[in-house]
Image (cartoon, rainbow, N blue to C red):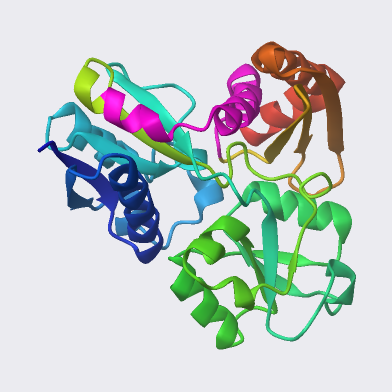
């Protein structure tokens, strides 16, 4: 019997995601035993600092990677959008998995069906510069405010009226069985998600052939291609996962359509571009699209963020 150890964060969402990966692997490999090792990351320890003020990458992932590198775990399960675009030496993404919900969604304190129905000056909780910039672009009167904590903590802050509404990734709510809390889901073509949002990344040591063979059985090639194209936007723009940048790719009949944007923090200088081409050329298409964004003024926006 094969016995593997998986590293995961200890929050409810991380555990739910890891259990789903484990169950999927054991369905294919019935005699596989998997032990769970919970790891506390920097992001789990620091729940007060606004994510948009962070300069470091790997806030939610580096300690999991440490466990892999040290041989304390055989694989790790990440929300793919949290992983830095630069792969740590010796590690690899062996499976990209379960990308069913890429969208952002809004959970409001009172029933609403669109952003237009929120009251003037509504206070919206979010941990993302990307979401905040798009909110301001769509409605200049809205007040995005920093929101940290796990999903349950964020919902509690909404329920105690600290915010009029909060913005979350739909995938997290659905995986926790909290989809009924969603007021409405944004169209990802209009309110563009974070690169690789909704996808799970299963990471292993590159030289661990037996584990890699087991994990590769759940890899979703379409999810890998779309998430990879979106992450290529970040890599080409050299802006990191906390910048007000979004990307959304969709494959239809062998063609990939990629949309991406960059925006200043006030939501005023919103630059969006899109491209379509063969899915086999996804990464090069994404790189060209990212360069278009930079040439259209995205480079100036990024320079302003560094001041």
**Residue stretch rendered in magenta on the structure:** 212-241
Number of on-image labels: 0
Q: Residue at x 29, y 24 (%)?
A: 212
Examine the structure image and report whether residue 233 is included in the region drawn in magenta: yes
Q: Nearer the viewer, residue 136 or 107?
A: 107
Q: Is residue 21 visible?
A: yes
Q: Position of residue 2 (x, y in %)?
A: 13, 36
Q: Residue at x 23, y 43 (%)?
A: 6
Examine the structure image and report whether residue 128 is included in the region drawn in magenta: no
Q: Position of residue 144 (x, y in %)?
A: 69, 63
Q: Position of residue 284 (x, y in %)?
A: 69, 11
Main structural element of the magenta stretch: helix, strand or loop?
Answer: helix
Q: Quadrant of the N terminus?
A: top left
Q: Is residue 99 above or below residue 122?
A: above
Q: Is residue 189 left or right of residue 67?
A: right
Q: Is residue 233 left or right of residue 150?
A: right
Q: Quadrant of the C terminus?
A: top right
Q: Quadrant of residue 179?
A: bottom right
Q: Residue at x 66, y 24 (%)?
A: 233
Q: Is residue 125 above or below residue 259?
A: below
Q: Quadrant of residue 272?
A: top right
Q: Residue at x 58, y 37 (%)?
A: 196
Q: Is residue 150 left or right of residue 108?
A: left
Q: Position of residue 198 (x, y in %)?
A: 56, 47
Q: Is residue 41 visible?
A: no
């Amino acid at each position: 019997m094969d016995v593997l150890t998986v590293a995961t964060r200890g929050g409810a969402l991380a555990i739910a995601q890891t259990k789903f990966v484990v169950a999927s692997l054991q369905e294919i490999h019935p005699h596989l035993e998997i032990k769970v090792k919970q790891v506390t990351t920097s992001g789990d320890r620091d729940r007060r600092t606004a994510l948009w003020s962070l300069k470091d990458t790997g806030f939610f992932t580096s300690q999991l990677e440490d466990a892999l590198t040290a041989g304390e775990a055989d694989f790790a399960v990440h929300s793919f959008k949290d992983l830095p675009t630069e792969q740590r030496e010796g590690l690899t993404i062996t499976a990209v998995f379960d990308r069913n919900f890429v969208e952002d969604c809004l959970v409001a304190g009172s029933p609403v069906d669109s952003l237009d129905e929120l009251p003037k000056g509504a206070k919206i909780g979010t941990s993302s510069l990307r979401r905040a910039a798009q909110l301001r672009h769509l409605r200049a009167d809205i007040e995005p405010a920093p929101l940290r904590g796990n999903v349950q903590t964020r919902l509690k802050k909404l329920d105690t009226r600290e915010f009029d509404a909060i913005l979350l990734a739909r995938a997290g709510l659905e995986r926790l069985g909290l989809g009924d809390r969603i007021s409405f889901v944004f169209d990802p073509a209009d309110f563009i998600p974070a690169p690789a949002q909704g996808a799970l990344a299963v990471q292993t040591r590159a030289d661990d052939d037996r584990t890699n063979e087991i994990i590769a059985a759940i890899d979703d090639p379409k999810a890998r291609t779309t998430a990879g194209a979106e992450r290529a936007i970040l890599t080409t723009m050299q802006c990191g996962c906390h910048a007000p940048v979004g990307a959304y790719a969709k494959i239809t009949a062998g063609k990939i359509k990629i949309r991406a944007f960059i925006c200043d923090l006030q939501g005023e200088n919103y630059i969006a571009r899109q491209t379509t081409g063969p899915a086999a050329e996804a990464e090069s298409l994404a790189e060209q699209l990212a360069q278009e964004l930079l040439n259209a003024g995205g480079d100036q926006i990024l320079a302003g963020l560094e001041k």
